[in-house]
Image (cartoon, helix red, strand yellow):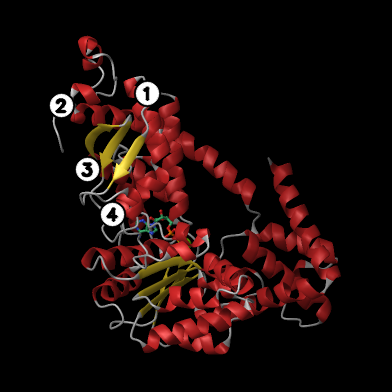
Amino acid sequence: MVGGVIASSSCPCDVAPGRHEVCIGMARSDRELRGKILDYLRSHHGDLCRHWFDDIEVLGIEGGVLRLLVAEPIRLRYLQRVGTQVFSEAAQAVTGRLLPVRFLGSTTGVTPERVPTSSGAGDGSDMPASLDEQMVLSPDYSFDQFVIGPENRLAHAAAMAVADRPGRAYNPFVVHGGVGLGKTHLLQAVCQAVLARQPSARVVYISCCTFIDAFHECVKAGRMPDFRHRFRNIDLLVIDDVHLLSRHEQTQEEFFHTFNSLFQAGKQLILSSDAAPVEIPALEERLISRFNSGLVARVDRPSFETRVAIIKAKALLHQLTIPEDVPAYVASRIDSNIRELEGALARIRALAQANSVPVSLDLAKQALADDMRRDVERSPSIHAIIEEVTRYYNLKVTDLLSKRRHKSVALPRQVAMWLARRHTRYSLEEIGGHIGGRDHSTVLHAVRTVDHRRELDRALSSDVSRLERSLLRGDDEAR
Ligand code: ADP
Ligand code: MG
């Protein structure tokens, strides 16, 4: 903690010196003020709180602004992005007066604007604003916070090796797997580890979506040299959700050259994708082979034990006290992905807060009952899809599930697979298993075919839309 008691001239209450005792009750010291702010945040914005908020130090008040010191650059930048408003609200609530908050870095004279960005590339000024946004890394996504289980052990070990020896361990490093299984977490953990060891490293972490947008913007504005400079003069390029390159031929072409240029210079590339490279629809062969030339690691759905460990870790991170029996209960109820686990924990916290009671097993059960109802409402079952498709195309279920390849059956079967892929959380293998015992490549082919044909064939496109609508309406009726 820096500084001691707030000097009366900079006391948050700003009352006349003669009446200074008025403020004493509000904030006797920096520590006290911080404690009150954090208490307020815990009770009003619990989901935003992190245990490392305890490391924030109060520097004092200058020009009517409460200055808070955040020593670690990634936390600093994160708070500057997402914390200013709520911390100002908290400062106002606990001092009773308007008190905007400003987060500062530890280096003397470093203003928030001049704190190095997590990009490390530091030349965001001549790029579209959206690019700079993407550079914010979440302090939550560090290796420390990553729970290791058999489902992610290889990906985690490889990520650690890459962070240790960028460009020399596995290049490129590709992590793939379903949604909410920790890909972004691992990618950002590598960035943070590299930056922690070598703060001057030029690291760019970007979502593929932003990469594509930036590419189009730069093409339109005739600023491709800027674009190339940005992405080719760096030490580590991390592109999240690279499957989104699918069907973006021009961006694929540019990315191919970015890839080669970095690779040849011995720079590290890390990519994540929702499918293995070969399964990314409409991805150029030469990119597939580049992606496969390094290490491709899959993350799978977490086992029960991993889920329990993750829930405990998240509760700790969010400073949520939960009884011993709650993690196992939540883990037994939610097995899809980790984002869902976090959602459940957030709802448990919200319910506890709304009722001003501590978290208990009963409360968790109540919170999850709502959760599961919502889940059922959200996604149709594969059986509902099969029934709807056979009804729509006037087929028998046995035909749809048979090996018949006649067009009249094959197309509806592909549509059913497409709907299952889009509207359920089942993997390609699982969908294949439910729809006539096909393997994952058949399902993948079906998904790609329907995607492709929908663009060219109006009738098919409207069939699929109608089926989607009635499947979702079916859920409505079930409510
Ligand atoms: P993806 O990018 O695969 O969709 P994310 O990396 O965004 O998934 O993960 C979703 C959430 O689950 C994040 O909050 C992340 O911290 C958490 N998470 C995923 N895997 C783990 C893990 N092994 N340990 C701790 N948290 C995890
Ligand atoms: Mg992600």
Label 3: element kind: helix
Side of 394 relative to 339 (left or right): right
Decide which of 143, 53 is in the foreground and name it. 53
Q: Earlier in the sequence, mark 4 or mark 2?
A: 2
Side of 126 relative to 1 (left or right): right
Cα–Cα gap, marks 4 and 2: 26 Å
Cα–Cα gap, marks 1 and 4: 27 Å
The residue that disc 3 covers is: 55
Residue visible at 66% across and 70% down in the picture? 435
Residue visible at 49% across and 74% down in the picture? 226
Residue 23 in picture, x, y percent from top left: 25, 16
Figure quadrant of the N terminus: top left
Residue visible at 36% across and 50% down in the picture? 78
* Residue kind at label 1, given as amino acid type: Ala
The residue that disc 4 covers is: 73
The residue that disc 2 covers is: 5
